[in-house]
Amino acid sequence: MQEEEQASGAVPRRRRRWLRWVLAVPLLLMLASVLQVAALRFVDPPFSAFMVARQLDAWSKGDWDFRIAYDWRDREQVSSNLPLAVIASEDQRFAEHYGFDLEAIEKARARHERGGKLRGASTISQQTAKNLFLWSGRSWVRKGLEAWYTALIELMWPKSRIIEVYVNVAEFGDGVYGAQAAARTWFGKDASQLTAAEAARLAAVLPSPKRYSVAQPGPYVQRRTRQIQQQMRQIGGVGYLEQFE
């Protein structure tokens, strides 16, 4: 009888232990992500999740010679034309929103309801979160994690750090990540020397850097480059970036 009571008492204890673990694991993961973002506020990332995924993909296909092109450059070592170009091209409300451009989201939704193609309204903060910490795809899990990391980045990093990290981890060609690698690969110069036209061409391929070419720009990239240069002037030229200093 006593043994039965002890056995029956052990079951609730085991359940309580499992429940504690079930509750503790998400909290530990949240804490780890907070510490991760906090550290990268000051430490330059040696790689991104997208870089790791691309390298592993190459190795999985037997391409053992494939190497990621990535060479970090601090903000002052990158031509102001590039951050200006990506803001003009991808997120002109970058200085105003807190990670999520609700106005752009509403416009995208309304356009889709009118029969237009559904397009994303992803901000530079969201793209930084995705490129740095996550994986490509459209699952709800990934979108939820993207929102979480975006909120952390906006809370813990100044805008100047967000744009600095973004231009260093964005992919400008297959396996070519960041301003310095892109400048060296496509233009044979350092990132500090990029002209407005070159920066605009780099920004023009960001929607799909494997589909569009910086080295051999087709009609779309050429047209988009001209549009971005015009937008760069419209938002105030490189003087626009002074608000982030």
Image (cartoon, grey):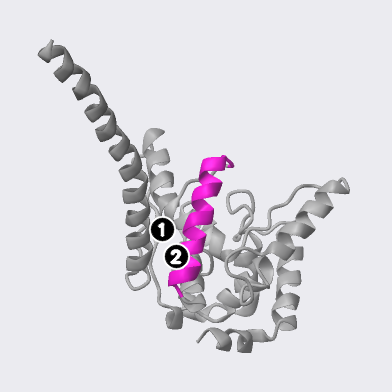
Closest to the observer, 30 or 175? 30
Determine whether, in the image, residue 113 is placed left or right of residue 128.
right
Say which residue appears at 72% left-offset and 58% top-offset: 105
Find disc 2 in the rendering and name its residue.
181
Give whichever of discs 1 and 2 has the lower sequence position: 1
Determine whether, in the image, residue 67 is placed left or right of residue 103.
left
| Residue 170 in view of the camera | no
Closest to the observer, 6 or 98? 6
182 versus 161 height, above or below: above
Find disc 1 in the rendering and name its residue.
69
Instruction: Judge whether residue 150 is colored magenta.
Output: yes
Q: Quadrant of the N terminus?
A: top left
Say which residue appears at 46% left-offset and 60% top-offset: 177
70 versus 114 height, above or below: below
Image coordinates for residue 224, horizontal then vertical, percent: 73, 64
200 versus 54 height, above or below: below
Question: Which secondary structure lies at badge 1?
Answer: strand
Amino acid type, mark 1? Ala
Image coordinates for residue 158, horizontal then vertical, percent: 47, 77
Image coordinates for residue 130, horizontal then vertical, percent: 50, 54
Where residue 24 sits, quadrant-wise, is top left
Answer few, some or many: residues within 10 Å of disc 1's Cα (few below 14, many 20 plus, some between 14 and 19): some
138 versus 10 height, above or below: below
Say which residue appears at 53% left-offset and 48% top-offset: 144
Closest to the observer, 63 or 229? 229
Instruction: Judge whether residue 148 is colored magenta.
Output: yes
Outermost residue on the left side: it is 2
Amino acid type, mark 2? Ala
Where residue 228 sits, quadrant-wise, is bottom right
Answer few, some or many: residues within 10 Å of disc 2's Cα (few below 14, many 20 plus, some between 14 and 19): many
